[in-house]
Amino acid sequence: MRRNGFILLGIALLLGVALYQNSNQGILSWFSSEDKQQPSLSATALAKSGLKPGAAAPSFTLTGLDGKTYQVGGKRDKPLLVNFWASWCDPCKEEAPDLVKMADKYSQSLDVYSVNVTMYDQLSKAKEFVRQYKMTFPVLLDEKEVAYRKYNGVAFPTNVLIDRNGVIQDVIIGTLSAEQLEQKLENLVKM
């Protein structure tokens, strides 16, 4: 009997906190069918990430699956798309074919670095992902989450568009349609 009393007390406390937090909207607003404007996942995640367009891209150096060393940060010959992903991520699987097409289409004017956050993945599964989607651009291994931390990673996939001067132009958390992604890349390579 006592246990039920504690459970009821806990529920009452949670209900009280919820009512207090929403008191400025009125209790009846909970039952309203109005469509409330909620921030999108990517807007919320972007706010949490702390990455801001116009800021210098954090520098990092990682080794790729090809054994070469790749560096991000500072001026470059071409703009750069940095894609953070994991092989188990379903949205990453959805966007992979589009990334491959865009990397091929813009290969003369854009670099693409695909960063597998290996700390949250398995190397064998990451290699299989690369084979399955026929990724021909550099695939970097972030085995200790160094780069992902510098970019305040909050979700997979995260794409960061960096201009020739090493300045972040856009941060995309989650996926976009192929058309939306291409428009952003067209704008980036024109800079």
Image: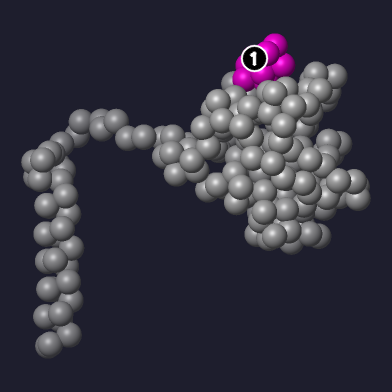
Q: Label 1 belongs to which residue?
A: 187
Q: Residue 168 at what x, y percent from top left? A: 61, 29
Please say if 77 is above or below 141.
Answer: above
Tell me what residue is drawn at x 12 percent, y 87 percent: 2
Rendered-image quadrant of the N terminus: bottom left
Please say if 131 is above or below 76.
Answer: below
Please say if 79 is above or below 47.
Answer: above
Lateral position of residue 72 relative to residue 65, left or right? left
In the image shown, does 9 or 48 lie closer to the viewer? 48
Q: Is residue 184 magenta?
A: yes
Is label 1 in a helix, a strand or a loop? Answer: helix
Residue that extends furthest to the right in the rendered view of this protein: 67
Q: In the image, which residues are magenta?
A: 182-191
Q: Residue 7 at what x, y percent from top left? A: 18, 76
In the image shown, does 10 or 66 lie closer to the viewer? 66
Q: Quadrant of residue 98?
A: top right
Lateral position of residue 10 relative to residue 51, left or right? left
Tell me what residue is drawn at x 79 percent, y 40 percent: 71
What amino acid is at disc 1?
A: Asn
In the image shown, does 157 or 93 lie closer to the viewer? 157
In the image shown, does 184 or 62 lie closer to the viewer? 62
Q: Residue 11 at what x, y percent from top left? A: 16, 68
Can the viewer see residue 159 in this picture? yes
Q: Is residue 143 magenta?
A: no
